[in-house]
Amino acid sequence: MNRTERLNAILIQLQSKRIVKAQEIAMRFDISLRTVYRDIRSLEEAGVPIGAEAGVGYFLQENYHLPPVMFSNDEASALLFGEKLIEKMSDEKIKTDFCSALYKIKAVLKPAEKDYLEKLHEHISVYNFNNMGTRYQQLWLREIRDALVNRKVLRISYESKYTEEALCREVEPIGLCNYSSRWHLLAWCCLRKAYRDFRLDRITQLELTTLDFSNKKHLSVEEYMQANSQFSNSPNITIVVEQSRKKFLEDTKYWYGFLSETSEGVHSTMHFSNNELHGFALWLLNTGSHAQVIEPVELKEILLKWVHEAYAFYFKPTTPLP
């Protein structure tokens, strides 16, 4: 990107939000702060009315407007990929809002760019089998979005995996997070007096209240995830698997806290960090890797218990059918 292209991109970035920090511009274009200051001066000399707040950032004067933005093929294609992902990873309300915005964007594209997107559309698909149920038609994303911005309490009915009945509780949301192909609401639970992770497809009812919690200091999403991560840099699980069967673990080992591996002869010793031993045990059984657990003893006991229960169930005497 040459300097002229960068100046135009900075101008668009300044219009994208109320205040833009110099550090944001530097990180986006991988340039120094000194270069940012020079670029801002060049825009000002060209007649662009840029304001600045010491220690805060830059902003465009309210009476200044850029001409309509044009999109390149690469940018328009990126929007199409976003449309495909939104279609499978959000609820009906957000899909409707996104499609409406995308129509407006497509309206300003050049004819050649519109044809390009039309041809590409039928060749891109996203499959997310976790969201095929009716629960994913209503994930309350719009209401949670408003609660996060306005710092309002949410009143929810939630079905945890340990209970059949939905429990009503009030929560102070700190963020939305998507992992393992599911949306999660991270929030302070007023009932439990602790931070909790709520899967959106388990929320049966949600109400955006007028209760305000602006005066409270909560963890950020990043701080919450770090504090509640089941992984660390110190291994607590060691398994041994035959080289010929190691392939059954390769695709998913990083999801379960894989750290390192050493090979000797026909066997590989693999080290993991994962505090959710039941989930790890289930993964080992499902992979078909025939891995041998070296440590911890608790993991061995969980696996032995499940194997014995399965054996007893399938080999118990049965009454012949009449």
Image (cartoon, helix red, strand yellow):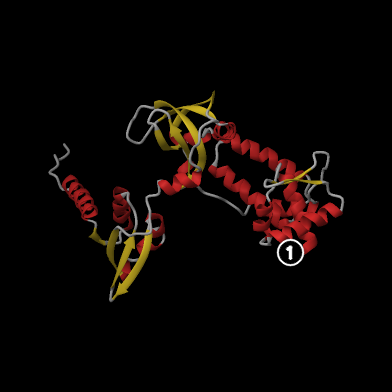
In the visual, does 18 lie left or right of 298? Answer: right
- Camera-side residue of 35 and 293: 35
Q: Quick check: 166 left or right of 309? A: right
Q: Is residue 94 visible?
A: yes
Amino acid on which disc 1 is placed: Met
Residue 85: image x %, image y %? 57, 47
- Residue 258 appears left or right of 217: left
Identified at 19% across, 49% down, the residue is: 305
Which residue in the structure is indicated by mark 1?
Answer: 1
Give the answer, above or below, for where 79 lies relative to 131: below
Q: Is residue 125 above or below residue 214?
A: below
Where is residue 261, by image quadrant?
bottom left
Residue beneath the point at 66% across and 53% down: 24
Image quadrant where residue 162 sits:
top left
Place of residue 297 in the rendered image (x, y in percent of width and height, measured from the top left): 21, 55
- Does 236 appear above or below 163? below
* Front residue of this view, candidates 37 and 131: 37
Q: Residue at horizontal 60%, vertical 53%?
A: 124
Relative horizontal placement of residue 271, taking residue 219 as reference (left or right): left
**Residue 266: image location, x then y, percent:** 28, 74
Is residue 119 in view from this perspective?
no
Quadrant the N terminus occupies = bottom right
Q: Position of residue 173 (x, y in %)?
A: 50, 34
Q: Residues within 10 Å of mark 1 (few under 14, many from 20)?
A: few
Which quarter of the figure is the C terminus placed in? top left
- Number of on-image labels: 1
Q: Residue 135 or 173: which is nearer the viewer?
A: 173
Q: Secondary structure at mark 1?
A: loop
